[in-house]
Amino acid sequence: MKKYLIALFILISFITTSFAEPQYLETAGDRCYKNREIMYPLEEVFDALKQTLMQSNLNIVTVTKEDGILTAKGSMLNEEEETITSITMTLDFKQRTENITSVKVIASYATQEKKSEIGQIGASGISLPIPVPLTGKYTLTGSGNIESSEWYQGFFSSVNRILFENHMKYNTN
């Protein structure tokens, strides 16, 4: 299950190369993999965050640019394991200087599994349990905050790629 969460953003960032990444600044109190100081203006980072969420099949639920908040939700079906994993992300972004934007991300997940039911057939006082085909009922099997540093690195790698592509597209002379 964890590998499917990580794969969601790592697959998107597969093409990213080292020269394409924007520079980051680390502040003393923010050495966490969920936070970044990105050396791009707020407008460019805002657009890259929205594009990354949409390319990751997450629906943007709330956008409050003035307050610097984006929330998004999405679900991923794993037919092999018959599970649905829902992801909710909240992004906090603030302009620190003209060309530095701070981004903080919090993500959570909820996994539901398809369940089968047991029925019984019998006659003359003898009954045998038989599995009934999957009924389409899903039950919650796990939830919590995503704490995988690889997952967040995949997200920021996707943002990096989009920032670079957009910068090259609109700022070539």
Image (cartoon, helix red, strand yellow):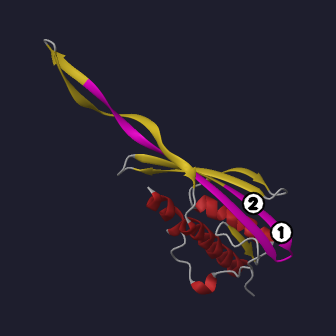
- In the rendered image, residue 107, in percent from the top left (x then y), is placed at 62, 56
The crowding category of the residue bearing disc 2, from other C-alpha atoms within 10 Å (few below 14, some 14 to 19, many at least 20), is some
Q: Name the foreground residue: 48 vs 10.
A: 10
- In the rendered image, residue 95, in percent from the top left (x then y), is placed at 83, 69
- SS for callout 2: strand
Identify the residue at image location x=75%, y=60%: 92
Residue at the far left: name it: 124
The crowding category of the residue bearing disc 1, from other C-alpha atoms within 10 Å (few below 14, some 14 to 19, many at least 20), is some
- Tell me the residue that label 2 is attached to: 92
Numbered range of the magenta stretch: 90-119
What amino acid type should be assigned to the residue bearing mark 2? Asp
**Is 94 covered by the magenta stretch?**
yes
Specify the quadrant of the image occupied by residue 24. Answer: bottom right
Q: Is residue 6 above or below residue 23?
A: above
- In the rendered image, residue 71, in percent from the top left (x then y), is placed at 69, 52
Residue at the far front: name it: 29
What amino acid type should be assigned to the residue bearing mark 1? Gln
In the visual, does 28 lie left or right of 160?
right
Residue at the far top: name it: 124
Q: Is residue 58 above or below residue 130?
A: below
Tag shown at residue 12: none
Identify the residue at image location x=37%, y=37%: 115
In 3D space, how far apart are the residues under numbered discs 1 and 2 (Cα atoms)? 10 Å
Specify the quadrant of the image occupied by residue 21. Answer: bottom right
**Is 103 covered by the magenta stretch?**
yes
Identify the residue at image location x=71%, y=71%: 36
Q: Name the foreground residue: 171 vs 158.
A: 158
- Tell me the residue that label 1 is attached to: 95
- SS for callout 1: strand
Q: Is residue 58 above or below residue 96?
A: above
